[in-house]
Amino acid sequence: MLTKRLTNILIAMALILSQTQTQGCKHMPVITLTAADSAICFERDILPIFVSSCAKSGCHDPATAEEEVILNSWQGIMAAGVKPGDPKDSEVFKEIQGQMGGSGYGNLNTEQKILIQKWIMLGAKNTVDCPSDCDSTQFTFSGTIKPMIEKYCIGCHAYPNASGSIELSSHTGVANAAKNGILLNSLTHPTNWMPKSSKKLSDCQIRQFEQWINAGTPND
């Protein structure tokens, strides 16, 4: 009886250990790079994610510099702990996997984490002035507008801690900001445009927003 009970305990412990190891693996997905991944651009693809979700007021912007970390430039991101070629040994990526920013502050989604992981695997290069694949004839909410909102805006404008009470984490919120003029005015302001601490959106990207708004802000 004792031997059987001990066996059951050992089996249970093994199952718990297996689940723990599996959960740990989820934090660092196995990624296989493809030829297309060589086109990943720091300035176009990576920096906007850090600016929106990390380098915001109260966290890692220049004014706050929480824990003396500023994440609005390649130099700052590298200094915070990026080991080119090795995401697992990069402190910044470990923090991202642990959801830097906390609940309700526009946590990075899986696609964004994988993109940053690939960028580090490719050497974490400071690539700038990369060609754009923007197509101004494409402006659906799901395929164009929402991805840009998630990339450039959601870090500061996610429910329930939306900056300026401008919530952009839902179609309703984005549509409301578009209809009252706040969204387009913020994107096109000549000196104080959004997103902050980032390059102004391209004319093509702004045109996509304009066409979606002119079409009635559909949830398509």
Image (tube, rainbow, N blue to C red):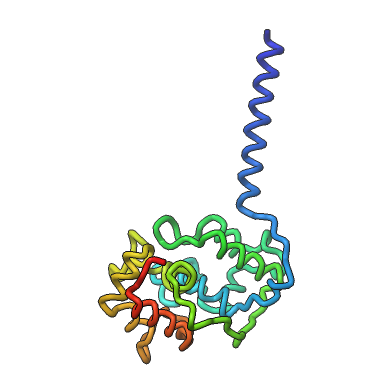
Q: Quadrant of the N terminus?
A: top right
Instruction: Identify the residue at image location x=34%, y=80%.
Output: 214
Residue 220 in the image: x percent, y percent? 42, 67
How many marks the image carries: the answer is 0
Residue 109 in the image: x percent, y percent? 52, 60
Looking at this view, is 5 or 113 the one in front?
Answer: 113
Instruction: Identify the residue at image location x=33%, y=69%.
Output: 163
Looking at this view, is 102 or 188 the one in front?
Answer: 188
Instruction: Identify the residue at image location x=32%, y=83%.
Output: 185
Residue 29 in the image: x percent, y percent? 65, 55
Observer able to see residue 143: yes
Looking at this view, is 44 or 141 the one in front?
Answer: 141
**Which residue of the protein is positioned furthest toward the top in this rendering?**
1
Instruction: Identify the residue at image location x=32%, y=64%.
Output: 172
Looking at this view, is 16 or 158 the one in front?
Answer: 158
Observer able to see residue 60: no
Q: Is residue 39 left or right of residue 52?
A: right
Q: Is residue 213 left or right of residue 68?
A: left
